[in-house]
Image: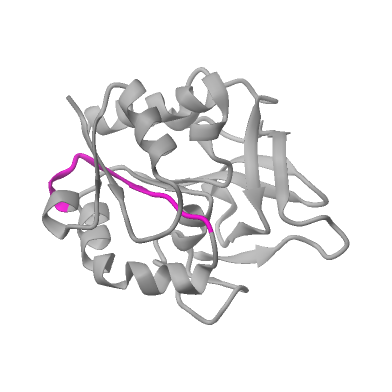
Amino acid sequence: MVAVAIVDYGVGNLHSIRRGMELAGAQVKVSSESAEISAADAIVLPGVGAFESAMEQLEDKLDIVGEATAAEKPLLGICLGMQLLLTSSEEGNSRGLDLIPGEAVRLPRGLKVPHMGWNSIRLRRAHEITSNIASGSNMYFVHSYYANPKDPSTVVATTSYGVEFPSIIALGSIIGTQFHPEKSGKLGLQIIRNFVRMAGST
């Protein structure tokens, strides 16, 4: 059975993410312990809230995340967790994990923020994370910032809300979803299943 560690660094409700991973067949630990996170086959970085405070909470886990990515373990960043994968953010002065070069930028002024509710994703390239997901599928979003990666080839899917923004990015074994797959019904569960399958094949 695939072992998935959900990093508990004090941001977000982790119950629904855990339940989704378990439904996908994973053995799940929600943990802040370095040894437990390192022992997992795959890692999930959840997150709601502010970029800078999240990076402060995550600071003592940076080595573990770095080791996991060096070992090419699948890493999934969800919502704020996706933005933390980037180099920096317009929200605060903290540096991100810099696993996917780029910046988190604020949604355009004049739009109601956060962008909250169901919206469709448009697939831009093939990737294992979107297996059995059709372009135009609806996912659930709650965010005020979005990823602006330097390399356009890292964009797997986009969504339109005042601007066309990346809703899935990926580089190697590192994946980010701006939407919450754990809140996106059957299609969100398919995304989670795809991630667990990726972890089982490494």
Quarter occupied by residue 74: top left
The chosen color scheme is: one colour
Residue 34 locus on image (x, y percent): 16, 59
In this picture, is 122 found above or below 179? above
Query: Does the magenta-highlighted stretch encompass residue 33?
Result: no
Quarter occupied by the N terminus: top left
Picture residue at 66% right of the left edge, 41% below the top? 158
Question: In the image, is 10 to the left or to the right of 61?
Answer: right
Question: In the image, is 182 to the left or to the right of 71?
Answer: right
Quarter occupied by the C terminus: top left
Where does the magenta region start and end? 38-48
In this picture, is 147 found above or below 201? below
Query: Does the magenta-highlighted stretch encompass residue 44?
Result: yes
Asked whether residue 123 appears in the rendered view, the answer is no
Residue 154 locus on image (x, y percent): 52, 49
Quarter occupied by residue 57: bottom left
Residue 161 locus on image (x, y percent): 78, 47
Q: Closest to the observer: 187 or 121?
A: 187
Taking the view exactly as shown, the residue that stands out farthest to the right is 110
Picture residue at 49% right of the left edge, 74% below the top? 52
Asked whether residue 167 appears in the rendered view, the answer is yes
